[in-house]
Amino acid sequence: MTANTNDTKASSAKPSITESQAWQQLQAHFQQVQSLHMRDLFAADPQRFERFHVSLGDILLDYSKNRMTDETHRLLLELAQQAGVEAWRDKMFSGDHVNLTEDRAVMHVALRNRSETVMRVDGIDVMPQVRRVLQKMRSFSDAVRSGEFRGYNGERIKSIINIGIGGSDLGPLVVCESMKPYAQRGLNAHFVSNADATHLLETLKNVEPESTLFVISSKSFTTQETMLNAESAKAWFLSLVGNEKAIAKHFVSVTNNTEAAEEFGIAADNIYEIWDWVGGRYSLWSAIGLPIALYLGMDHFEELLEGAHVMDQHFKTAPLAENMPVIMALLGIWYNNFFDAQSHAVMPYSQYLRRLPAYLQQLDMESNGKTIDRDGERVDYLTGPIIWGEPGTNGQHAFFQLLHQGTKPVPADFLVPCISQNPMGNHHRVLVANCFAQTRALMHGKTTGEALEQLREAGLADDEINDLFAHKVFDGNKPSNTILFEKLTPKTLGSILALYEHKVFVQGIIWNINSFDQMGVEYGKELAGDIQGELSHRDQTECYDSSTNALINHRKDIYFRHYERRDYDKK
Ligand code: F6P
């Protein structure tokens, strides 16, 4: 272990956060405020929005529709202070090994550092290497987009297929999907991640090998799904092109394992480097963003970095009370740990952001889905929530019923642009109105009096009203944040993604967990390897529990019978 790591570890050995004064005070405070209704808080204080919102550039975070008072706000900020959020944030920005279990720095902020500031990892300024790779990405993406770089037979590249999974898929995917208006005509970006061959095969149906560029994205270059898809893509390509040399014009890779990529057959020049201080789910800012640069152009990729950098500077320098990621993190903790909210919903009122919930699922749940704290102890409080969501207005016609009248508390984020990328008739006004209407309805609810009045106005008879009115009452008091921004540009998107990254970081610090490893993913992978072996032979499997054995044996029966019959029929 380096001196860096030892320092970090020593300073983290502290009593549980639940024993801190701020936590205890929050617990007592919760008893006093849990029965308060936001409707009354708004009525009593016309300045509530003024006091509970914060802006950064074109992004406005309205957090006034939360079950909080000034005292809640104060105590939550104290919690952040007592948990050492500022000190840990500074450690991350200084390149300390805040990823304790893997003994690594966590420096994705260096990837989007647009200033001249030196950023060191283990004593070395990483900025020259970051800039070198960005330059290489620029040269290549410019060449592909201008047609200077062409396929083996001189065809222009029309399709980019990213093969990767997890952070090597979701980050570039959410950006490419969200930024479609900035894409170059005639260039398509596809993302293949699933081990199910359907994903690859259905994608290949839409492309021609001569005009396709595969980007094999894998930090480790060992991830099973990615390797499977990469090998199958190569086999598909060679079966149609029949020329090994053509691979150099159609396969590039982004990886930390250049040796394995070269062994796969990727030319050294076609390998884009990432570093061990870039975590998978924080990697879209690195060369893992190559599909973004290819699809949107390097200028737009750099605008995305700029937006993230603006959020980084805000996170680093704004006082906690005005710090957007800190505020969102603290409100999340308030609901997670004091209201026992099990999940957190994300509702983008933007079709372009439809994959944001999936991206945030990995970011948040892989980072903070932990039970063991930084000191190796089992936590006795809830950590990361279940993240889920769908774009509005679709969600309104699916699961919003539960948000309004269900029995489970679900705090939610609503994201909405003021200006549409696709102005058409009344669409955007309807979309925005629905977003604002939902947060208002969730907060305000509908009282018995209001429900009765509405039913009377509708002309219902008294007995009908009696039967119905209870179903028409909405408790309200359901919390939400609204993130309102001017337009979904690369810069704004960069800021929003970085906002969530830092939110997750702050929560991890307060819960005293390491947000930067993902050991839970490993166990399933190990077992899958063993079971794969079992599935390859006909003998009965008996080494697992009765359920797993039965499932394996059932599949073997059906599978082998299916193929035997097919072979028999062929004869
Ligand atoms: O799901 C586990 C994980 O390690 C993620 O953290 C990572 O983003 C993904 O697999 C892909 O890893 P790699 O880029 O090494 O293929």
Image: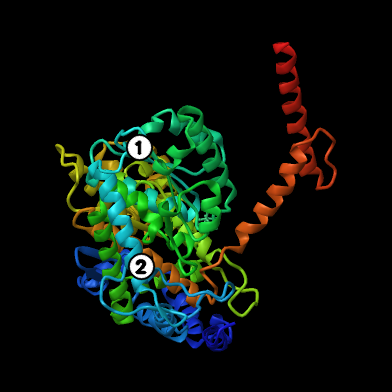
The location of residue 552, given as percent across then percent down, is 75, 38
Looking at the image, residue 382 sits to the left or right of residue 122; the answer is right
Residue 54 versus residue 13 in the image, above or below: above
Instruction: Find residue 33 and report its image quarter.
Output: bottom left
Between residue 77 and residue 399, name the one nearer to us: 77
Where is mark 1, residue-wise?
Answer: 151
The location of residue 448, given as percent across then percent down, is 35, 53
Q: Amino acid at mark 1?
A: Gly
Looking at the image, residue 283 sits to the left or right of residue 313; the answer is right
| Residue 453 in sight in this render | no
Q: Residue at x 49, y 30 (%)?
A: 242
Say the numbered circle drawn on residue 130.
2
Specify few, some or many for label 2: CA neighbours under 10 Å numbering under 14, 14-19, or 20 or more: some
Quote the CA–CA distance across marks 2 and 1: 28 Å
Q: Is mark 2 within 8 Å of ligand 1?
A: no
Looking at the image, residue 484 sits to the left or right of residue 14; the answer is left
The location of residue 525, given as percent across then percent down, is 65, 52
Q: Residue at x 44, y 81 (%)?
A: 88
By what rule are the colours in the image chosen? rainbow
Q: Residue at x 50, y 78 (%)?
A: 97
Q: Is mark 1 within 8 Å of ligand 1?
A: no
Q: Secondary structure at mark 1?
A: loop
The location of residue 255, given as percent across then percent down, is 48, 57
Q: For the C terminus, give its image quadrant.
A: top right
Specify few, some or many for label 1: CA neighbours under 10 Å numbering under 14, 14-19, or 20 or more: many
